[in-house]
Image: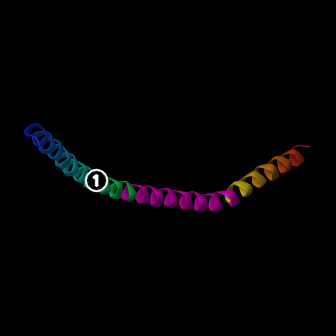
Amino acid sequence: MSTAAEILVIIVSSFLAIFLIISIILGIYLIKLSAQIRRVTKSAQSTVDDIGSTFSNISKVISPVFVGEVIGRIMKKYTNKKGSK
């Protein structure tokens, strides 16, 4: 092999080694990033589930109270109209 070919082989192999090291480092960072994203999504899902169950419980309590309040208003209207006649 000629000297020029040997120099080209050395240069190309050096660039390949540098790109290999960079790709390994980027791969490690991507794995860490995906682990962080997974933790954040689990936390967000847990928060959404908690909020959903809270609203569900609140709606179970408020619904009977609201119905009772509406019935009370209707009864109050009719009793007031009967008394005024």
Quarter of the image with the N terminus in it: top left
Residue with the most extreme left position? 3
The quadrant where residue 55 appears: bottom right
Residue type highlighted by circle 1: Gly
Residue 53 or residue 5, whichever sits in front: 5
Residue 49 or residue 58, whichever sits in front: 49
Q: Position of residue 85 (x, y in %)?
A: 92, 43
The quadrant where residue 15 appears: top left
Residue with the most extreme right position? 85
Give the residue drawn at x 49%, y 61%.
50
The quadrant where residue 7 appears: top left
Q: Position of residue 74 (x, y in %)?
A: 81, 50
Give the residue drawn at x 81%, y 46%.
77
Is 65 left, or right, of 13 in this rendering?
right
Residue 10 or residue 80, whichever sits in front: 10
In this figure, which residue is indicated by the disc labeled 1? 27
Residue with the most extreme front position? 1
Q: Which residues fall within the magenta stretch?
A: 39-64
Q: How is the image coloured?
A: rainbow
Q: Secondary structure at mark 1?
A: helix
Is 39 left, or right, of 15 in this rendering?
right
Give the residue drawn at x 29%, y 56%.
32
Indicate whether residue 45 is drawn in magenta: yes
The prevailing secondary structure element of the residues shown in magenta is helix
Q: Position of residue 52 (x, y in %)?
A: 55, 58
Q: Position of residue 20 (x, y in %)?
A: 22, 50
Give the residue drawn at x 31%, y 57%.
31
Is the residue marked by circle 1 packed among few (<14), some (14-19), or many (20+) residues within 10 Å? few
